[in-house]
Image (tube, grey):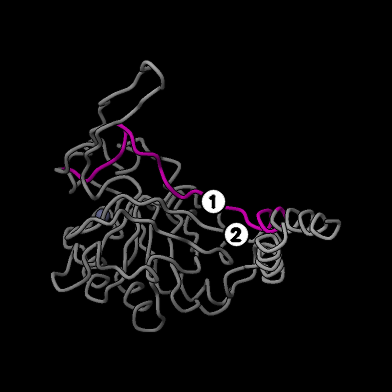
Amino acid sequence: MMITNIFKVVLIMCCVAYVHTFKVVDLTHELSDTTIYWPGNPQYNFSILARGQGSSFWYESNYVAQSEHGGTHVDAPAHFYEAAWRTHQIPMERLTGLAVVIDVKDKARTNPDYRVQISDVTGWESANGRIPDNAVVIMNSGWGYKYPNKTAVFGTSTPEVPSTFHFPAWHQDAVTWLINKRFVNMIGVDTPSTDYGQSSDFPTHVVMARHNVIGLENIANLDQLPVTGSRLFAGVIKTKGGSGGPARIFATISTEDCTTSGSIPLPLPILLLCIINTALYLHFW
Ligand SMILES: [Zn+2]
């Protein structure tokens, strides 16, 4: 009995230590009446079906309808290429990867039409090392702070007219470089589109779609991520035949070392101790 009590204590200590090794960052704007959609897309529709105290319990249930491309969301490759993956066809392993955050806030502040250049990507590599395989490469333009102010996010006083939009995103040459020279799972922005506001032919969308690279748009809280050393997850809703959809995007950061890149920052010895103790618990407790 004495031994099993020791196991209990060790088990609890290990699990507490394991949980405390990670920090989780929410990279998602909440869905509400203020959610920003591309012009022409129906707005978010939330209505209460039931909310109240019954005879023996409280009960809530709601109806939610929305367009795929609004708020923090995923672009499935089929959004811009018919033969590419639709939402339900995206392999799960493509919806995660080590995050590479490219900071262009200074450039975007003076030029809202800024597009991330190849030199921004190679400059990141000079400072932080080669972009890892299956990475998620994200532009941090500082635009996330403007959300959900529609005129500020679209950079225009007429947010219903796309030709007047001014916000930063990716240059197609930088996206093409990432696709040809590295292996990336996803490319993201903290703005409404991976193509900049003044684009009318959406070349980054097209090249990404043709190569089954997933897009992430309106990512939130990017200043909470280190430029390297976190792992991002894009939990997109699994709509059959979808061209994308709302996603809970989040990242895990090792609280022991947030600056090194590499594999998932799992403290393996602690995880093994948890497993061993759980096995002992099942046998002896
Ligand atoms: Zn989209």
Which residues, given as a range, are shown in magenta? 16-39
Above or below residue 56? Residue 142 is below
**The magenta stretch spans residue 159:** no
Q: Nearer the viewer, residue 222 or 29?
A: 29
Which residue does the numbered mark 1 point to in the structure image?
Answer: 25
Q: Write down the quadrant of residue 272 in the picture.
A: bottom right
Q: Position of residue 183 (x, y in %)?
A: 40, 79
Above or below residue 236? Residue 84 is below
Left or right side of 42 for 88: right
Q: Nearer the viewer, residue 57 or 179?
A: 57
Residue type at the position of mark 2: Ile
Which residue does the numbered mark 2 point to in the structure image?
Answer: 253
* Quarter of the figure that contains the N terminus: bottom right
Above or below residue 63? Residue 126 is below
**Image quadrant, ligand 1:** bottom left
Residue at x-position 15% and y-position 74%? 83
Q: Position of residue 265 (x, y in %)?
A: 62, 68
Q: Nearer the viewer, residue 215 or 120?
A: 215
Q: Write down the quadrant of residue 215 in the picture.
A: bottom left
Q: Position of residue 159 (x, y in %)?
A: 23, 39
Disc 1 vs disc 2: Cβ atoms closer than 8 Å?
A: yes
Is disc 1 placed on a helix, strand or loop? strand
Most distant residue in the bottom direction: 181
Is disc 2 placed on a helix, strand or loop? strand
Left or right side of 95 for 78: left
Label ID, residue 34: none
Gap between marks 1 and 2 measured at Cα: 8 Å
